[in-house]
Every structure is written in C-alpha cells, then in structure tokens.
Image: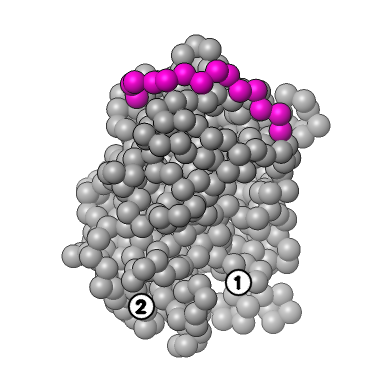
Amino acid sequence: MKFVHLVFTFICTSLVLTSCKDDKKTETPMASNSDKDYYTEPYRPQFHFSPEKMWMNDPNGMVYNKGVYNLFYQYYPDSTVWGPMHWGHATSEDLLHWKHKPIAQYPDENGYIFSGSAVLDEQNSSGFGSEENPPLVAIFTYHDAKKEGKGNTNYQTQGIAYSTDNGETWTKYEDNPVVSVENSTDFRDPKVFWYEPDQKWIMTLVAGDHAEFYGSNNLKDWELQGKFGTDKGAHGGVWECPDLISLKVEGTDEEKWVLFISINPGAPNGGSGTQYFIGDFDGKNFTTDQMENRWIDWGTDNYAGVTFSNTPDQETIFIGWMSNWLYARETPTETWRSAMTLPRILSLKKVGEKYSLFNYPISNVNDLISETGEENIKIMAQAEDSISSDSLMQSEVLFTTSTKAFELKLGNSDGEELLFKMDGNDQEFTLNRSLSGKTDFQEDFAKTVQTMPVPDLPDGEYEVRILMDKSSIELFLNKGQYVMTAQVFPNQDYNMLKILNTSDEVIEFKEFEINPIARVW
C-alpha cells in the first residue's frame, strides 16, 4: 500500500421475561444481500457474524456436516436486550459468509432454551435417524423461569432434539429432560463429544463452581462419571459454557486435554472471560497439575467460546461471543446486539517447559484481505511515526518486530484514540479504550486499562497482527500465543495510526502492512 508518513515528532508523554413463542418453525424476515444498505448500520461488523436484528449471545450447537457449518446461538427475537432464550441459526460453507436461517429451537413447557452443543450421531446410537441418514442431535439446557420464580432449586435441566435434514428442522425428544438433578440452580451448558477409547458419549457441563462429566451410549440415558474444579482455577463468579477437547502437542505425538470454562464475573480485566486448563482425561475424570489461572483471551470481549464438532481434517475451530456481561445489554447499537469473534484455529505448543494454547484466525480470512504492499519502518529513540489510512476501520495491521517498547494509537480528528502499549520491562501488553469514542453508555466499559502478561513472548522477532472491523479489535501476538479482543465505538472513523518508540534505541517494524478487508454480507 502507499503509506502517507507525517513528520517525526519527539514525545515526552504517554499517555419473564414475558415472551414465549410456540414450538414451531417460522421464517425470519431477511433483507436482500443485494440491498446496498444491508448490514451498513453504524458499528455493524462487516466480516464477523452478527444477527440481522435483536439480541444474541453465546455460540451454541456448532457442528459441521455435509459441507455445511451450522452455527446456533442464544437469541431473543423480541428485543435487543436479553430475554427468553431461543436458538438462532446460521449456516456457512467457509465460516465467513453466513446465511441466516429460521429460529431452530423455541422455548417450550420445560423452559427457555439455554446454551448447549450439537453432534453428528454417525452410528445412529440415539435411534433418531438411520444408518443411511444419521441425525444431528442437539443437547441444551432448559431453564424453567416459573420454577426459578417460586424458589425451586431444580429449574435447570438438560434436553435434546434431533434433526434428519442437516439442521434445517428439529424435533424435541418426547422424554425430555434427559438429565435432571435436585439442586440445579446453575446446572447448564452441556458440551458433548464422542470418546473413542470407551465407545461412549461424554457430556461436560457446569454446576455452579465446578464441571461435571456424564457418559451415555445413546445420547438419551446419562450417568455421572466425575467432577472437576472446586479447588482449581478462577472462582470469582459462576462457571459457564465448558468445552473439553483433545489436542496433539505440535511437532509431537503427545496428546493433552484442554478444558475451557467461562466465568462471570471474575475475568482478569473485569466481567466475563474464558479460562482454560491443560491436563488429562480418562473417560471419567479430568486431572491437571496446572497451578496458575490461564485465559484464552485477555481482552474483555471474548466469552462463552466453544469449538465445532465433526470438523473436516479434525481441525479445532473456536468461536466466542464478542461481548461482556458488564455492558452487553447497553452497547450503542440500535437494531441488533453483539457479534461473534472470527473463527480461530486452536493449537497446543510447548513453550519452554510449559504447554501453551495458541488461537489464531482461520486461514480463510486471508481470502478477504487485499494486500497493498509492505515496507520496513525504523523509528528513532523516543520518536513517533504516523500513517494515514481511510481503510483502517475495516483492516488488517500486520508487522514483525523484536522490540518490546512501543505504542500504537488508532485515532481520528476528534481526538479519539485507542491505545496499545508493549512494555517489555513489566512484561505486559495493555489496551486502553478510555478515549476511544463512545464510552459513557456504561460506567465499566472503559474504566479499566486491559492488561495482558506476556512473560513468554520470544526474545527475537514476533508477529503483531490486528484485525479491526468497525466496532471490534482482535489482536494476536506471535501468531496467537497472546490474544486480546475488545469492542470500541468511535464517533468518527479512525483514519490515523501512530507508532511510538518508547525506548532509547532505534526500533524497526518489518514488513509493515495496512490491508483492507472485504465485507462478507
């Protein structure tokens, strides 16, 4: 690309819910993608998934089958604020271009439809399909608001539904719920997978302050296998949205298990976040010798993330909800609320003597990026360089460097700015959105400078990649070793990037690029 450099300047400062639809299929009205105004509202993401309208939160039931990725999600069709939960539905062939589908699951006499998962029952163990046409089976939490209102403690149970047309239509199991316990105030979010060594299904769900593992041969009859977590990990809030996956350690034949637990509140930068544990699983119990709390994303806006089931080539693909319960109900969007993160590939690597989970955008994202050229940038000690770009709000910023003493500022002529800072002395990276634009819609939105420890970042060169999409920032250091995701709401588009050298030496940014990213709607 052609960079427009401004003069170097020396610097000395741094900065119920009352709705319940009939259990039936109705078409969701959809605008035409040929409409030039489609998906162009202020702050509307252009290459991330967001609902056409109304409220969305957790990704649910993510499953691949017959060339199609199914994304279900927590959805309330009557408001842009959380209400009685349904499952919304969208499909894609590439995880980027999505087709909106009718609502997949409606509340019924057992309750609202909370978070869960979906699997391809290849052997038709459930009997819901056939050998020739194995069913998709969805497993979800029922939330009975009436029981909750009466003070009962068994208002969350687990139900199932099945589809024999690849997720287009669903039938709920007549003997729901399939898992129920007496004390179930926070008993939810089942994530199911096939455990090959024991030839059985495993359901991971949460129960307040711990995870529980259930086993089944047919997806209908479940028995408790084991529990984990009352004395492990962060416990600043309720445990939610678990996921248990196996990963090979890159470059080896060693296999480890990774357990994801979302927590709200209690995340390191406030509100909700997703921690993970690396350990072992034997079909009944998960064990780990991990002592420190570890987070898949240190930004404030990646929550309730889980992985796809039945992916081609056994890739482990993760999507999270790009918001935070501190302010999710109040973000300044008018016709819809919330978006999903970009799909990310998860990988496990050995860094020194420790295992580390990396997460990085799927390679398909590169197909949306128009490379416009690169250049090497050198900046004198305690100096800055500025680059103007009209495509900054929908772009990739990419470079490699070995320095750990710099700041990046995205800004506009109104004086609004989003500040990133790498501080090698403190071994941390920070994101400050206090001056980023609209922040007063909720008192906690910009109160905290988001901090990410980076103690194991390489001593040599590493990659910095930032993907900006109208109202979101996803930052990846060293190809996903360290990650931050955050929302921003500038009153005017950012069109200026400032790079500041905060060291007493000349620093270099190699192969520096600002590349526009195409919209997918």
In the rendered structure, the answer to whether residue 402 lies left or right of residue 262 reads: right
Q: Which mark is residue 280?
A: 2
Label 1, on which residue?
314
Q: Which mark is residue 90?
A: none
Q: In this orientation, does residue 258 appear?
A: no
Asked which secondary structure carries label 1, the reply is helix
Q: Mark 2: which secondary structure? A: strand
Question: From what the image shows, is residue 307 above or below residue 270?
Answer: below
Q: Residue at x 65, y 55 (%)?
A: 363
CA gap, disc 1 and disc 2: 19 Å
Q: Amino acid at mark 2?
A: Asp
Is the residue under label 2 in contact with that under label 1 (CB below 8 Å)? no
Locate residue 127: give its quadrant.
bottom right
Residue at the image point whose x is 34% and y is 40% from the top: 423
Q: Residue at x 41, y 70 (%)?
A: 350
Point out the residue furthest to the left here: 231
Q: Nearer the viewer, residue 499 or 447?
A: 499
Q: Picture coordinates of residue 296 (x, y %)?
A: 40, 54
Position of the C terminus, as image quadrant, is top right
Residue range highlighted in magenta: 1-22
Q: Nearer the viewer, residue 267 or 327?
A: 267
Q: Hey, what amino acid is under mark 1?
A: Gln
> In the displayed structure, does residue 157 sit left or right of residue 20?
left
Q: Is residue 6 magenta?
A: yes
Which residue is depicted at the point 59% across and 75% down?
A: 121
Task: Indicate the position of residue 434 as horizontal and vertical percent values.
Answer: 36, 24
Badge 1 local density, few (<14 within 10 Å), some, or many (20+)? few
Image quarter of the N terminus:
top right
Vertical order, 320 against 171 (above or below) = above
